Image: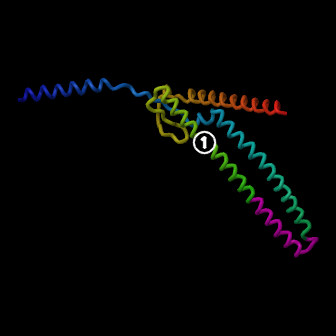
Amino acid sequence: MKKVLLIIAISISVVACNKTGEVKEVKTAYVDTSVLMKEYTEAKDLEAKYKAQSEEKGRQLEAEINRFKQDAANFQSQAQANGQEWAQKKGAELQKREQQLSYAQQALAQQLQQESGSEMDTLVSGVKKFIKAYGKEKGYAYIYGTGDAASVLYAEEKYDITKDIVKALNDKYKTAAKTEDKVEEKTEAKTEEKK
């Protein structure tokens, strides 16, 4: 009886050892998301777009702020000449303008932040979908993210596919931009033909 149990135990261990030999290697990689967003052309274009908008709208607001500062400086010199009643009335007007300018600055900052945040969310969502498709195409079981919000504390550099992803994304973005330019050119040509 003991021999039978021993033979069964040995048989089970042999079968178990054979099954572990059948496990195939899992293909994994990681992407440095902070590098990806710095080097991805569409992300750079988006950042430049909102920086330009911020500067343009900021210049308009800055001109109003400078006018306010000039009026405030003139107020100091005119207050003594025009009397206390005039100074109180004018001072209240200046305070109201200053408050309106402050609200305008805050509203502008919020507007730009909301618009850029919305577009950035769409961009990040697109990048995630791209990485998922890339992983399936290349046969990866896992692609981890590192960078600012690291979910991987250590990985060998040979598993870093950030450059591959950046190149593929930039190629896709360039192709999409060229296609849009061609569509615009065809639309413009048809419009000119109708004239």
Q: Quadrant of residue 5?
A: top left
Q: Residue at x 25, y 25 (%)?
A: 17
Q: Quadrant of residue 50?
A: top right
Q: Position of residue 193 (x, y in %)?
A: 82, 30
Q: Position of residue 137 (x, y in %)?
A: 50, 27
The dominant secondary structure in magenta is: helix
Residue 98, compared with residue 122, is above or below; it is below
Residue 192, compared with residue 97, is above or below; it is above
Residue at the left extreme, as displayed? 1
Q: Is residue 184 magenta?
A: no
Q: Nearer the viewer, residue 165 or 136?
A: 136
- Span highlighted in magenta in the image: 80-102
Q: Give the residue type at disc 1.
A: Thr
Instruction: Look at mark 1 in the image and give the residue it sits on.
Output: 122
Q: Could you say whether the residue bearing mark 1 is in a helix, strand or loop?
A: helix
Q: Position of residue 172 (x, y in %)?
A: 62, 29
